[in-house]
Image (cartoon, rainbow, N blue to C red):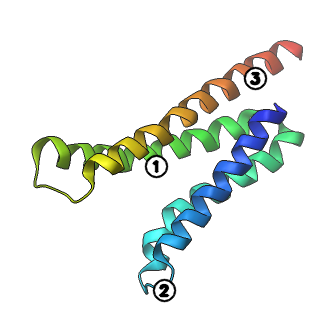
Amino acid sequence: MKALRFLTILVAMLLALGEIARWWGNPRLVPLALDECVVAAALLGAALASRRLGPAPLAAAWGCYCGLVLSLLVPTLDHLLHGPPKDSAVFYAVILAAMLTPGLWAVGRALALCRVSQRER
């Protein structure tokens, strides 16, 4: 579980810092970066809480992460496949799909750890 916690902290920091850097200096930072920052906070909180509460908070936080990435990926794919054309749609679709991959792995790993933890009780 230590590797999963490390990955969770790393992704939380990259997600929050990347989004803040993207919108820094723009007055729309607060509404547009809020969703990523909330998910990053959930990931960070889950990584810290998992020492006391086990892997369940990690599964929930990674599920939120996957939901966020899917909510960004689907409209991007819609623009790519059905238009209207969107600048850099291919780039964003590839990046978002790459972001979804570790998220799905982490959800599966956290759920597997929950099953192991349940059997130990």
45, above or below 82, in the image: below
Q: Which residue lies at the image location 33% right of the left edge and 49% below the top edge? A: 91
Q: Quadrant of residue 108?
A: top right
77, above or below 113, in the image: below
Q: Residues within 10 Å of mark 3 (few under 14, many from 20)?
A: some
Cα distance, mark 2 to mark 1? 24 Å
Q: Which residue is mark 3?
A: 113
Identity, as a three-letter code, of the amino acid under mark 2: Gly
Instruction: Return the disc, 3 or 2, that comes first in the chain's sequence.
Output: 2
Q: Which residue is mark 1?
A: 68
Q: Which residue is mark 2?
A: 25
120, above or below 99, in the image: above
Query: In the rendering, at what x and y percent does residue 65 appear?
Result: 54, 45
**In this view, the mark in front (2 or 1):** 2
Q: Which residue lies at the image location 63% right of the left edge and 32% below the top edge? A: 106
Identity, as a three-letter code, of the amino acid under mark 3: Leu
**In this view, the mark in front (3 or 2):** 2
Instruction: Return the disc, 2 or 1, that comes first in the chain's sequence.
Output: 2
Which of the pair 92/119 is nearer the observer?
A: 92
Q: Is residue 82 left or right of residue 86?
A: left
> Judging from the image, what secondary structure is the residue with disc 1 in?
helix
Cα distance, mark 3 to mark 2? 41 Å
Instruction: Return the disc, 1 or 3, that comes first in the chain's sequence.
Output: 1
> Judging from the image, what secondary structure is the residue with disc 3 in?
helix
